[in-house]
Image: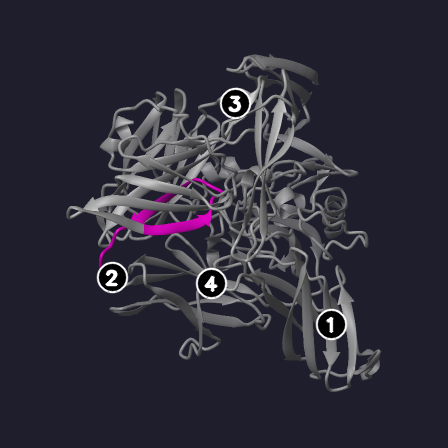
């Protein structure tokens, strides 16, 4: 505890009960700020679980609390490794960061620039505890601080605004013991909506900070603002993400400006005339964004972020993005999507399912209804004649589209008036916010359980309270009691290694094994381990070994190919000769390139010509049809994260498999449900293990590491470009695109 008082910060650790070695934890760390930049000591932090309706307070200096979630396993783990966000951030040349480790470990820290170059590093063996490092950066730009603790990896983004300090990582503090406290009795579940309010004594008066309300899904460092007056806002325009044929997300970053600051964007197709103005609809800490829809395909748009408060308006630089080419399979295709929000926009549902869409043609006076899941309107004009859909239809007819969705037993609708042409239309439903109808509190023990003064001796579900919100939504609190002398848990492990260690036991053969643990309450916890070992392959050309995975009737490498006989500079491009690149490396020394973190973690990036012949004997670069076979199998065999079955065997119909194909680490955090960056521990149900290796893009640039992973297919399209597949951190699908042959992407081989 003294370490946290010494470092003038307060931390809140959210952890779960589980067997040692299988725990997961979310760490939320707090820092007080006064008048934009000055440090303010926190007297206490009020923590509110909005989803479950409880509030607790942690006090200085004892500002560590563990909020526990029961998962039927009886022992407590202290595996709370974490790399905390640096303070301050942004920073002027130097900043500090803390690394918490739960046991003595070999650690490696690397300062990496925007091109993936390792600028400086720190290696050492440290005891369990919290360790403090001073980070120096030479240039004003964004950096990554990567930490490896044993076999675990962590990463944070840092923004430097200063010059001339040089690049360095310096160890500056003694190790302090990590202490678990178990006074907090309320239950926390990953993904709950949480509220955090800080309290401090300022000029002799008790003062409350701003309240941060958000869905808590990942480790985070939160600054609680006690500013008594506004400052002129400072805003930066960030690169756009999620760019499709008709959609894109504009992003900005607010350095300061106070609580009453309006954030938004100006955009348009002319950089000298940004005629459209939108207010930001999504924010995470200082970052804010706005999702554009209805854009024209294959069009360049320009935008800049702005921030306005009582002292004035500041704007960032003008950035641009180009929408993708539309895949046209019909003369006119109108696609419909939907979102929902509460009346005051406090709650935003990022996805609302369309039950149906009523299509009214005003020009030709007919009506047709599309029902879920067939909510795409396709119109074809054979031989330049009008197509009959109930009645005639023509290009640019006046249309009225009415979307319908149901929520909590009620039906909601919204209309869009438009001319008939190919586009994506988004319905925005106004839905009153309701609490969950039932809230379950689950308690497990080996003996009678006492809750709120009542002792329960029998298993069962007990209604203990019924609440009603302001929107007249019943919330029933159910107490689930489970009393048992044995708790059983099954673990399925498939690995290409020749051994596997669980607890104190190491297994060298495949099979079923049982381990029995006794918890602090004396309950037996039985773990059944179903183990499959040795699913691997070794490339005789260079000795690299690869895990493999069987998906349907196909056998895939479960890792990116690492074969690299030569390496080329990122400026050396070709459409006709093989090229091999390593993300962030601009030299030509193979051994030097193979020693980099990006090569060892993600493998090389190949141009199309190199990719065609890179796979070893017995393996080959997958065709577009083989990629489609993989996607259709995943969609039809439980890997679509919304549960939809793609019965028409069309990879593009309802592709929500990106999360099932993505690895469980290294992705940029996303608030888009069922995307690879959302709850990463739920990724990779297919075993494909796709990592965000980034691309070697046009103009010799390395781009999108930790945001995107892309893999070549062997086929060419009609324009002479090569097909590919890619995953993006905030998209739910496995996307198909085509690119120029000189682009650098990863290679994933499939068995002959």
Indicate whether residue 578 is drawn in magenta.
no
Q: Which residue is mark 2?
A: 230
Seen in the picture, residue 180 relative to 357 is either above or below; the reply is: above
Image marks 4 and 1: residues in contact by CB distance under 8 Å:
no
What is the spatial separation of the Cα atoms under label 4 and label 1, in whole angstroms? Answer: 28 Å
Q: Which mark is residue 724?
A: none
Q: Nearer the viewer, residue 229 or 669?
A: 229
First in sequence: mark 2 vs mark 3: 3
Seen in the picture, residue 706 relative to 27 is either above or below; the reply is: below
The magenta segment is 210-232
Image marks 4 and 3: residues in contact by CB distance under 8 Å:
no
Mark 3: few, some, or many residues within 10 Å (few <14, many ≥20)? few
Label 3, secondary structure: give it. loop
Q: Which residue is mark 3?
A: 21
Mark 4: few, some, or many residues within 10 Å (few <14, many ≥20)? few
Q: Which mark is residue 281?
A: 4
Label 2, secondary structure: give it. loop
First in sequence: mark 1 vs mark 3: 3
Image marks 2 and 4: residues in contact by CB distance under 8 Å:
no
């Amino acid at each position: 505890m003294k370490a946290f008082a010494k470092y003038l910060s307060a931390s809140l650790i959210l952890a779960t009960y589980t067997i040692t070695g299988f725990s997961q934890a979310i760490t939320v760390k707090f820092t007080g700020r006064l008048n934009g930049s000055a440090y303010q000591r926190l007297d206490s932090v009020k923590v509110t679980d909005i989803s479950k309706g409880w509030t607790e307070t942690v006090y200085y200096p004892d500002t560590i609390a563990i909020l526990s979630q029961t998962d039927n396993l009886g022992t407590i783990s202290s595996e709370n490794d974490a790399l905390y966000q640096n303070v301050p951030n942004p920073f002027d040349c130097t900043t500090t960061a803390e690394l918490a480790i739960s046991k003595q470990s070999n650690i490696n820290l690397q300062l990496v620039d925007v091109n993936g170059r390792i600028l400086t590093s720190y290696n050492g063996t440290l005891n369990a505890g919290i360790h403090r490092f001073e980070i120096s950066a030479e240039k004003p730009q964004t950096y990554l601080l990567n930490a490896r603790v044993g076999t675990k990896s962590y990463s944070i983004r840092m923004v430097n605004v200063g010059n001339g300090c040089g690049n360095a990582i310096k160890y500056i503090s003694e190790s302090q013991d990590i202490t678990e406290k178990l006074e907090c009795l309320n239950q926390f579940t990953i993904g709950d909506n949480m509220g955090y309010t800080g309290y401090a004594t300022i000029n002799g008066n008790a003062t409350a900070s701003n309240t941060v309300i958000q869905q808590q899904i990942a480790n985070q460092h939160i600054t609680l603002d006690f500013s008594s007056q506004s400052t002129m806002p400072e805003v930066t325009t960030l690169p756009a993400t999620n760019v499709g044929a008709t959609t894109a997300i504009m992003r900005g970053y607010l350095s300061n400006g106070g609580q009453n600051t309006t954030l938004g964007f100006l955009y348009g197709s002319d950089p000298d005339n940004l005629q459209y103005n939108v207010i930001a609809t999504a924010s995470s800490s200082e970052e804010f964004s706005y999702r554009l829809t209805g854009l024209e395909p294959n069009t360049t748009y320009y935008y800049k972020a702005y921030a306005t408060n009582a002292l004035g308006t500041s704007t960032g630089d003008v950035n641009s993005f180009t929408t993708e080419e539309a895949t046209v399979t019909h003369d006119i295709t109108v696609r419909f999507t939907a979102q929902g929000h509460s009346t005051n926009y406090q709650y935003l549902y990022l996805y609302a399912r369309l039950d149906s869409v009523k299509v009214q043609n005003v020009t030709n006076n007919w009506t047709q209804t599309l029902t879920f899941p067939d909510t795409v309107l396709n119109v074809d004009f054979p031989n330049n004649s009008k197509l009959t859909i109930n009645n005639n239809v023509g290009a640019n007819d006046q249309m009225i589209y009415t979307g319908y969705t149901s929520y909590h037993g009620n039906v909601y609708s919204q209309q869009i008036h438009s001319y008939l042409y190919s586009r994506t239309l988004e319905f925005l439903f106004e839905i009153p916010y309701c609490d969950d109808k039932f809230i379950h509190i689950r308690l497990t023990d080996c003996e009678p359980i006492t809750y709120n003064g009542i002792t329960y001796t029998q298993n069962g579900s007990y209604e203990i309270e019924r609440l009603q919100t302001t929107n007249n939504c019943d919330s029933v609190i159910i107490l689930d009691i489970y009393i048992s002398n044995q708790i059983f848990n099954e673990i399925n492990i498939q690995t290409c290694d020749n051994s596997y260690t669980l607890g104190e036991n190491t297994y060298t053969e495949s099979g079923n094994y049982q381990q029995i643990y006794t918890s602090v309450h004396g309950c037996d916890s039985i773990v059944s381990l179903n183990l499959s070992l040795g699913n691997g392959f070794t490339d005789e050309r260079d000795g690299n070994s690869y895990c493999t995975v069987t998906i349907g009737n196909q056998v895939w490498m479960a890792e990116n190919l690492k074969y690299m006989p030569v390496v080329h500079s990122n400026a050396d491009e070709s459409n006709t000769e093989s090229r091999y690149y390593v993300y962030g490396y601009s030299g030509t020394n193979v051994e030097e390139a193979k020693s980099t973190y990006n090569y060892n973690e993600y493998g090389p990036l190949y141009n199309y010509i190199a990719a065609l012949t890179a796979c070893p004997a017995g393996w080959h670069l997958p065709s577009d049809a083989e990629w489609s076979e993989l996607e259709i199998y995943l969609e039809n065999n439980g890997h679509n994260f919304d549960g939809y079955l793609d019965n028409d065997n069309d990879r593009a119909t309802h592709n929500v498999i990106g999360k099932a194909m993505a690895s469980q680490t290294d992705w940029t955090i996303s608030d888009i449900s069922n995307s690879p960056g959302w709850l990463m521990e739920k990724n990779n149900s297919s075993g494909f293990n796709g990592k965000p290796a980034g691309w070697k893009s046009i103009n010799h640039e390395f781009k999108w590491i930790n945001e995107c992973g892309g893999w070549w297919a062997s086929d060419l399209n009609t324009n002479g470009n090569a097909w590919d597949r890619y995953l993006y951190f905030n998209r739910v699908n496995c996307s198909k695109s085509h690119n120029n042959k000189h682009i650098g992407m990863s290679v994933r081989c499939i068995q002959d």
